Image: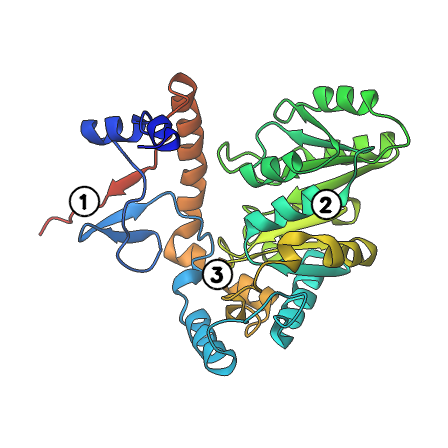
Amino acid sequence: MGLLQEKLSHYTLPQEFMAQGIYPYFREIEGKQGTEVIMDGKRVLMFGSNAYTGLTGDQRVIDAGCAAMQQYGSGCAGSRFLNGTLDIHVQLEKELAEFVGKEEALCFATGFTVNSGVISQLVGKNDYIICDDRDHASIVDGRRLSFATQLKYKHNDMADLEKHLQRCEPDAIKWVIVDGVFSMEGDLCKLPEIVELKKKYPGTAIMVDEAHGLGVFERQGRGVCDHFGLTKDVDLIMGTFSKSLASIGGFIAADSSIINWLRHTVRTYISLPAVRLLPLLPHARLCTLFSKSLNACRLCGMLPIMRLDVSVRKASRLATQKAPSFRFMCVIRRRRSRP
């Protein structure tokens, strides 16, 4: 056994939970995602899904994906920078930019690679990246790769954020990056207050990660920025396709000058293969699809599940305060109806 294997062999925490019968991760789901799923051959209620709009099983989306596979094949055979850009990539980027209220957008292979690529590249060593301490791991990894000075403020604590802004050099870019909806806490960022601080401290820019807000909040699911009416005050809007958009991938939307820079500098855009499952989306207009799907969510009961999911996430947070190394997934088995 080599030194690496010997060192890692002492990591036995997962096995300890397995032995106690309480290991909750990597459980197999046997079919489509919805408010109910099949696990171990049994129907259970799902409270951990990110499929907020229920579109992963929507026949229109499935049919559009099959049609796109027939036309374009199973892959793009290259990166967007060289031979991997399809006409439907460009079509989707235009629709996404219009949908979230920005001039242009770029699509990436995953939502994680949006944040890890964009955040690491946009600002330099004389600038600042300021993050909420509960931001998503992809934001954390992105800022770690940046040469900018990295600062964190206490979760949704605007006084702490302002203290950091006051310490920054006045002529430097001060880039505040925040989740629109915090995935583990279930609460919203204090975007109105962040925008006020942007106006108070020149050189401040804002990026909002709409991974959990897109498809859920405001007009046809345009997200938290639209919910607060502050889209124009936010410099960059990020979103994913793996939640409300029923696919895989991600995008960043901003004004043309920012997108032009990112298009030619971000390694996770230039060097990775183009999005494979992206053809699922452009075959149905996003606004129409969201408005219909949100109505469908109300009919099928997805929205009450989403509200309950917030409570579950908060309960999970309280539980992990006592046992920080362990998080849980809530799956409640459906009780059989009596004859």
66 or 85: nearer the viewer: 85
3 or 1: mark nearer the eye? 3
Label 3 element class: loop
Q: Residue 297: percent from the left, percent from the top?
A: 44, 56
Three-letter residue code for mark 1: Arg
Q: Badge 3: how crowded within 10 Å, few (<14), some, or many (20+)?
A: many
- The residue at the point 49 percent across, 53 percent down is 243
Q: Badge 2: how crowded within 10 Å, few (<14), some, or many (20+)?
A: many
Three-letter residue code for mark 3: Ser
Label 2 element class: helix
- Residue beneath label 1, please? 335
Q: Residue 23: percent from the left, percent from the top?
A: 27, 33
- The residue at the point 25 percent across, 26 percent down is 16
Label 1 element class: loop
Q: CA distance from mark 3 to mark 1?
A: 31 Å
Does residue 185 appear in the picture of this structure?
yes
Q: Residue 225: percent from the left, percent from the top?
A: 68, 46
Three-letter residue code for mark 2: Gln
- Residue beneath label 3, please? 247
2 or 3: mark nearer the eye? 2
Does residue 228 appear in the picture of this structure?
no
Q: Badge 1: how crowded within 10 Å, few (<14), some, or many (20+)?
A: few
The numbered mark at residue 121 is 2
Residue at the right extreme, as displayed? 171
- The residue at the point 57 percent across, 39 percent down is 181
Tag 3 or tag 2, which sits nearer the N-term?
Answer: 2
Q: Is residue 232 left or right of residue 82?
A: right
